[in-house]
Image: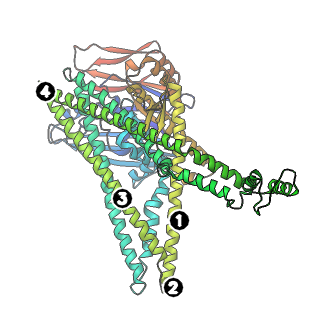
Amino acid sequence: MKLLKLTIENFRVFHGTQQLNLEVSQDKPALLIFGMNGAGKTTLLNAFTWALYGSFSDDVEHQERVINDHSWAQTPFGGQVRASVKLEFEHEGLNFIVLRAVTATKNAERQSPLPPKLTVTESEHGASKTVPNGQDRIQKILPEGLRQFFFFNGERMERMFTGDRTDEVQQAIKTLMGLEEIERAIGTHLPAASRKLSRQVGNDSDGRLQALTAERDRLEQQWKEVDDKKLELSKNAAGYEREVEAANHALRADAKAAPLARQRAKLEIRRRELLDKRGERQDRKRDLLGKSSFLAFTGGIDDTVLDLAEGMRKRRELPAGIQRDFIDGLLEDGLCMCGSDLPEGSDARKALEERRYNAGLADVESRWMYLRGKTADLGQARADLLGQLRDCVADIEETEAAIKQVDAEESDIARELEGVDVMDVQRLEERRKEFDKKRLDALQLHREAESQLAEIEEQREKVKRQFHSARVQDEESRRIQRQVALVDSVLAAFQRILTVKTEEVRQQLDTKVKGVFGRICIRPFTPNLTPSFALELVNDATGTPAAASTGENQIMGLSFVGAVSELAKETHDRKQGVGEAALGGGGVYPVVMDAPFGNLDVTYQNDIAESLPRLTSQIITLLSKSQSRGMVLEHLGNAASRMYVLRSYTTNRDAEEESITIHDRDFPYVSHGEFNHTVLEEVIV
């Protein structure tokens, strides 16, 4: 997917028609857009996603105000006004024009939400046609679940890869890598085929199969209902978490509440560290019990075994295979088993010694010796196990006590915030507590739903086995039974393939994230992509989760985006090379990012500026003046095919007009105007 042109008409802060030429060269893949805070960088970022998907990101306020405020104000009552975004791009040899527009008749002072109209045009070799199901076509080119990887706000991006959104990330990765087709076969096509075949068992056929088919249908319907509930709970929990974070952000911005809010944020980090530590100790305890708990039941048995074996040896009752030990006993006693003496140098003794040389199996003897040695060590092993278990329990109790202390301190902070003599602070704290409780309740219900799904799945497998193994009388029922068994075996094979391929993709991403992160971050931290596709930062020195700063979380997020882009391109190139393009998966996609540097210090800004042009073949970066100084502008400027300035016009005559310096030349940045709006102006240097 290669972006060609963006045309905006009366879209939010942009008045009139504005155009953005997006074409870049292969050696200069960057396009830079400079604008002050409030000039429309976030609006411009959302123009791309609104054109493609008809929605804004969560951080856009007053989402119903799509039409430019000045255009709306200038429209008389009863008159019509229009806003639109047109995005032109190329994908796999075809050119597309995506036009999304709203047309409103003004009958009130304020705008109301309006459904936009979408038109998608596809052209090839000069011939064009309107795509009948335009949104479906867009979804096939770049599914909406992937937008977070390619259109994002750098200051908020680290939230996309942690917490309750890991299911969304995992699903998006599967879509990008072409695993969605396998999932669709597992979740839809093969089960549907199995159901269809099972229902062919007629009324005159075996009643046992009919009953099992009915039970299987009931369990599948129950599973779907619980799974839908689980997904809804996951979305609710994520929404509640965003509300909690918004309240925390507002509290940190309040002068009186800020110190307490910051202290609580530190406590939350500390709690996560303690919870991780407790989880590790609990895993250690389970591991010890799983591998060595048998030692607790061997007390006295080891001595009994040794005594029995020694008695057998003395009584010459050792079993075959341990003959040498038996013969050694005869030679030591100087008495043959028949009662004859065995004096030194006698023929009988020489014969027995010769027999000893050839007797016994070496592996049996060595195993007996090994067992005798290990049995003698069991006492010490039991003592060591007991000591390790005591240490684990002590660590768990100590960690739980520390968690309770953090909870108590956080409760004290909550009471202090509720007692702040500022009504807004009190309301914010009440709101934070309300949504945090809702979040925790949703997560608890989510866990219960997961347990229900596991139980239902166990019952489904049991019914499936019963259907396969049921004894039936007529040949038609046996035929259906064989067909269902075949489909179910294919389904099981696809499930194994999906598990293997998902883990393979996760490991590839994990390696790439580590590589990108290591080139940027100077601290001894390593990112880790967990099996659930959550990103965590590990302290190399301790091997425990690191207390990462906002900047390090942002670097981790950028590393993830870079890794996803690189892996998608490699997958696309590999399939193109072997003629498997029709299989789907992978792709070359642009990256559009707002505020990629966030609150990073100068060193990290320079390192990221140097790394950004290598993320993908087309990268559009929106920057403020403060984020485009020194080496940052030098690195990005050298990689830029085009540059634009979002020139802000303000009616505030007290505000100073500003310019921005790009490659030693000044360009208008803030200007006085008759109304507030933003204009896109290309920078020619």
Crowding at label 1, few (<14), some or many (≥20) Cα neighbours within 10 Å?
Answer: some
Between tags 3 and 1, which lies in front?
Answer: 3
Residue position marked by numbered label 1 in the rendering: 490
Q: CA distance from mark 4 to mark 3?
A: 44 Å
Q: Which residue is mark 3?
A: 453
Mark 3: secondary structure = helix
Q: Earlier in the sequence, mark 4 or mark 3?
A: 4
- Amino acid marked by disc 4: Gly
Q: CA distance from mark 3 to mark 1?
A: 22 Å
Q: Which residue matches tag 4? A: 419
Where does residue 516 sit, x and y in percent of width and height?
Answer: 52, 31
**Please, what is the three-letter code of the amino acid marked with disc 2?**
Glu
- For the point 35% across and 54% down, the residue is 450
CA separation, marks 2 and 1?
A: 23 Å
Image-quadrant location for residue 569 = top right
Residue type highlighted by circle 1 = Val
| Disc 2 versus disc 4: nearer the observer | 4
At label 2, counting other C-alpha atoms closer than 10 Å, the crowd grade (few under 14, some 14-19, many 20 or more) is few
Q: Is residue 584 found left or right of 32 in the rendered image? A: right
